[in-house]
Amino acid sequence: MSSPFSILKSENGFLGLPSNLARSYEEAGAVIIPFGLEASVSYGGGTEIGPSAMIAASHEVELFDEVFWCEPVEQYGVVTAREPVIDNNDISASLKALEAMTSAVLQDGKFPLVFGGEHSITPGAIRPFLDKYEDLIILHFDAHADLRDGYEGEHFSHASAIRRVLDNPKAEIISVGIRNISKEEIPFLSENKHRITIHWGKDRKFWNYDKIVAPLKDRPIYLTFDLDGFDSSLMPATGTPEPGGVFWEDAMGIISRAAKVGRIVGADINELAPIDGFHAPDFLAAKLAYKILNYALAKPEENIFQGGVNG
């Protein structure tokens, strides 16, 4: 099995792995796919450099995970694709290119983790998963419902990311942290309540993590994480920040339980717009990526769900 695309040296890729933890594409269980598409941003910009900022920040992430009580990456191995040339003038063509990359990784039995770019990447990244898994369910963290049928003249806008995913009639979404929805999205939401469940940010203090993940039981899960899903005090480095959002313990509590009841098979993280000289948001995004991989692919040396589900 050879890599379908160019792979970065381990020290330059995600986590900046030393030689003793370096893996070939054939050996790796996970593949990072940087894809800095930025073509439809409608407020702040900068997401095109989000993937490179996440990779750079990941070199400062401690490999030892206190929840797993080991260095989980040693168990599964990870490689990082070289970011392809992206056509920001044609989102549809770019999504087809991303689809081809994720499809190749998935066909090789590996875990694709896409680093966006704006949230418009998700419909392309997820297509191979919807084709492969009959009962796939999507766990969606976001500030915005993203159910518009296009925005500012762009059918594949970042504001339409979930609507484009739901163009596939099999798609089913569990959205967490939503606190911004437009009047025009309500009819579609009402007509599709059988496959859209929203856990509103306004109700965060009443959330029950186990109830949130209950529909994920025994199912393959695709995780899409728009970083503006985090509260803006925690994640200001995004194009459309919103107050009243998810905090780290919420994300970890839900993702860890999702991994316990179902099987996370792929993911994307998007909408990081780095702020020059302010590293905390980049680091948060990089650590989130590592935690997602750990929960999806690693086995703990101690009980993962004993006293540390929010780790």
Image: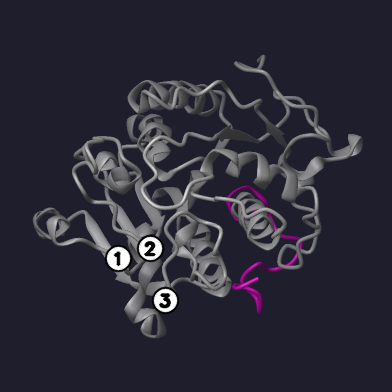
Q: CA distance from mark 1 to mark 3?
A: 10 Å
Name the quadrant of the N terminus. top right
Tags 1 and 2 touching, CB below 8 Å: yes
Amino acid, disc 2? Ala
Amino acid, disc 1? Asn
- Residue 143's disc is 2
Tags 1 and 3 touching, CB below 8 Å: no
Tell me if 291 is positioned left or right of 263 in this view.
right
Observer-nearest of 129 and 58: 58
Q: CA distance from mark 3 to mark 2?
A: 9 Å
Extent of the magenta region: 294-311
Observer-nearest of 262 and 194: 194
Tell me if 281 is positioned left or right of 36 in this view.
right
Mark 3 or mark 2: which comes first in sequence? 2
Observer-nearest of 183 and 45: 45
Tell me where residue 192 sits by quadrant. bottom left
Dot 3: within a 10 Å radius of its alpha carbon, few (fewer than 14), some, or many (20 or more) residues? Answer: many
Name the quadrant of the C terminus. bottom right
- Residue 180's disc is 1
Q: Which residue is mark 3?
A: 244
Q: Secondary structure at mark 2?
A: loop
Residue 91 location (% of width, % of height): 36, 28
Q: Secondary structure at mark 1?
A: loop
Q: Is residue 237 magenta?
A: no
Amino acid, disc 3? Gly
Tell me if 280 is positioned left or right of 266 in this view.
right
Dot 1: within a 10 Å radius of its alpha carbon, few (fewer than 14), some, or many (20 or more) residues? Answer: some
Residue 227 location (% of width, % of height): 50, 57
